[in-house]
Amino acid sequence: MGTLLRGGTVVDGTGGPRYTADVLVEGDRIAAVGPDAAGRADRVVDVAGLVVAPGFVDMHAHSDLRLLTEPAHLAKVSQGVTTEVLGQDGLSYAPVDDAVLPVLRRAIAGWNGDPGADFVTWRTVAEYLDRLDEGIAGNAVYLVPHGTVRALVCGWDDRPATQAEIARMADVVRTGMAQGAVGLSAGLTYTPGMYADGAELAALCAAVGELGGFFSPHHRSYGAGALEAYAEMVDVAERSGCALHLAHATLNFGPNKGRAGELIALLDAAVARGVDITLDTYPYLPGATTLSAILPSWCQSGGVDAARERLRDPAALARIREDLEVHGSDGCHGVVAEWETIEISGVTNPELAALVGRTIADIAAAAGRDPFDTCVDVLLRDDFGTGILQHVGHEENVRAIMRHPRHTGGSDGLLVGAKPHPRAWGTFPRYLGHYCRELGLFSLEECVHHLTGRAADRLRLADRGRVRPGLAADLVVFDPDTVTDTATFAEPAQQAAGIPYVLVNGAFAIDGGERTDALAGRALRRGADGRTAPGTHPTGGHRWPS
């Protein structure tokens, strides 16, 4: 016996036309799509007038710890997200050792929080995926993070890797993929990944490509030199033979206003040459990162402790100021810092809570201080854990890129801080409501395809991404007339409207608009055949504590 979703409009994730059908779920599978299945159901849910679609795939998520520390994970499951891709931007929590982990925890506390020294009990990719399989809200896919691997092999210093070190990094990457990761991420404006040259990246990507994985870089600039940075990533993919997925493929900051057409032409030319390229974007203008990320790369060489000492050294501080305010720091995408665009979104020091929601320029003006000095003071007092929004996007670029035929959806959602970017709660309903229904940038079928089937194809998901008998019952039911994001910059942690039902592996995560206590998600692992599917799931399902 199972659950029947009766009379809904099926938008099946292929991009093909919608149709009316019943969808029968038995166990964790879609058992039937069509008429005459009602007799096999012990629960019937009337979804007439609603859309039944595959669960959405968040191609760029930062839920690496949040899936474990907040089991309900309402931000994502309430949007209809049933699968997330973790290990992003070259920095995450596997593989690690006892030396790398403490530095790493502090370096990305602004992305993921820091639940304490004893929380990360795993060290390998396999152990991390096993930990996820103990009970998570949605499914998770993992990328081996290049920066973490580089820290393991080369440390946190600003220097090129030797050939022997590159070979060792390639072995670490191969091991991570053998343990279930689907590819390699990179963060080339973050330390230590930003110290890698193209030859290092191409060597690692060759190893990834041999195993059927893909490379997902946060490349060297989204500001000045952005198009050159995109071209470098295309070159790395072309030289290595590795598929390329461009993370949060935006064109931000003043120098890139109106230049989306140039990026699209660059990508289309590469695709015509045979390069396998996909990309993801979030449907908002501001970006989000950490305040420390805007510092120049030389300042951050050696890790957080070394950077702190440089911020206290007058000579180094003068050089940092010049990079930020005159030349344009590589950490700030080669653009001179515009303090009025940098808004504090979260802090780790409770004494700084009043700064959240204010820009560096505003904080400085209120205190009668210089903005650069204010920035340095916040970094030191918050132990480099400050999250920020950067209000530097352009609507015409956002719209043009999201319509590309190789586009997928990614929230890039940071779930920590008092006022995180609303994309963490609103990305997928915003695509459906604002850009699809209100602006008409895509048909509903095309929009759902971007958010489901196309992403599933990139991840080589063996059994999800479509509404089809025999596939996993990852499903979202939404009202096409009312689905919308309610998360705002003032109140970002707001559940979307118009999504009454979400199923993960056949279990209702959202039922009647309310979160259930189901934890039916699984770690989806790359198999020996290159396809991605659940591994051994120890108990077959969990409930989160009440």
Image (cartoon, rainbow, N blue to C red):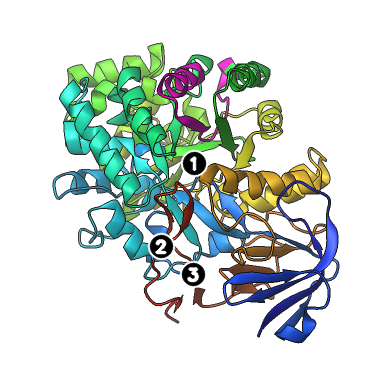
Q: How many marks?
A: 3
Local SS, label 2: loop
Q: Which mark is residue 369?
A: none
Q: Position of residue 484 (x, y in %)?
A: 73, 55
Residue 388, image quadrant? top left
Q: Are marks 2 and 1 in contact (CB under 8 Å)?
A: no
Which residue is most to the left? 99
Lower position in the chain sequence, tag 3 or tag 1: 3
Could one spot residue 372 in this view of the protein? yes
Taking the magenta stretch, the answer to whether it contains residue 113 is no
Q: Which residues are magenta?
A: 229-255
- Mark closest to the chain's N terminus, 2 or 3: 3
Q: CA distance from mark 2 to mark 3?
A: 22 Å
Label 1 sits on residue: 358
Question: What's under tag 1, amino acid-wise?
Answer: Arg
Q: At which x and y percent is residue 241?
A: 44, 25
Q: Residue at x 48, y 66 (%)?
A: 521
Closer-to-camera residue (445/118): 445
What residue is disc 3 on?
72
Residue 244, how many percent across, how many down?
49, 30
Asked which quadrant contains residue 252, the reply is top right
The reply to whether dot 3 and dot 1 touch (C-beta < 8 Å) is no
Task: Count residues near mark 1 (Cα–Cα under 10 Å), then give few for <14, some for 14-19, many for 20+.
Answer: some
Whether label 2 touches label 3, CB < 8 Å: no
Q: Is residue 408 above or below residue 392?
A: below
User: Which residue corresponds to mark 2?
Assistant: 535
Return the x and y of residue 320 as percentages of the image width and height. 29, 20
The residue lying at 85 percent from left, 59 percent from top is 19
